């Protein structure tokens, strides 16, 4: 847009979680998202309609803090997957929402063998 529109824009945490979940699922090596509270110790992959449950978004004074709970594919280096994932999430949040980002934490909950 060429002209500025006065006012404030408020984006809900659920919308941010959707943006993050979709960016995460496009990353190579990420098989799925899991719920952050795996009570029984077994990571269950969430269906695509519930990706938001695998993402926790918290507002801080420095910006948004994002926690991702993922399952990675066997045979792909976890460090490479997490680096690509944080880059994709950082890009999606800064490019699409223009929200300041404080921190991204990736929690690998499991590894899936094909």
Image (spheres, rainbow, N blue to C red):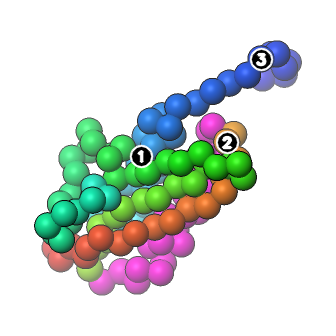
- Please tell me whether residue 22 is drawn above or below residue 35 in the rendered image: above
Q: In what element is the residue under mark 2?
A: loop
Q: Are marks 3 and 2 in contact (CB under 8 Å)?
A: no
Q: Report if residue 58 is visible in the image.
A: yes
Decide whether the magenta segment is chiefly helix, strand or loop. Answer: helix
The local crowd at label 2, few if under 14, some if 14 to 19, many if 20 or more residues have their Cα within 10 Å, is: some
Q: Position of residue 84 (x, y in %)?
A: 52, 68
- The part of the chain drawn in magenta is 75-97
Residue corresponding to mark 3: 7
* Marks 1 and 3, how far apart at CA: 28 Å
* Marks 3 and 2, how far apart at CA: 15 Å
Residue nearer the viewer, 14 or 61: 61
36 drawn magenta: no
Q: In what element is the residue under mark 3?
A: loop
The local crowd at label 1, few if under 14, some if 14 to 19, many if 20 or more residues have their Cα within 10 Å, is: some
Q: Residue at x 69, y 40 (%)?
A: 98
Residue corresponding to mark 2: 99
Residue corresponding to mark 1: 22
Q: Position of residue 106 (x, y in %)?
A: 46, 67
């Amino acid at each position: 847009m060429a002209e500025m529109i006065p006012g404030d824009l408020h984006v809900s945490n659920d919308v941010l979680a959707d943006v993050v979940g979709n960016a995460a699922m496009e990353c190579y090596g990420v098989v799925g998202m899991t719920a952050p509270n795996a009570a029984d110790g077994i990571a269950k992959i969430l269906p695509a309609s519930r990706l938001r449950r695998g993402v926790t978004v918290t507002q801080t004074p420095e910006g948004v803090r994002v926690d991702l709970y993922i399952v990675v594919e066997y045979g792909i280096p976890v460090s490479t997957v997490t680096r690509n994932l944080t880059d994709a999430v950082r890009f999606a949040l800064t490019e699409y929402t223009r929200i300041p980002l404080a921190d991204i934490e990736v929690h690998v909950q499991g590894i899936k063998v094909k």
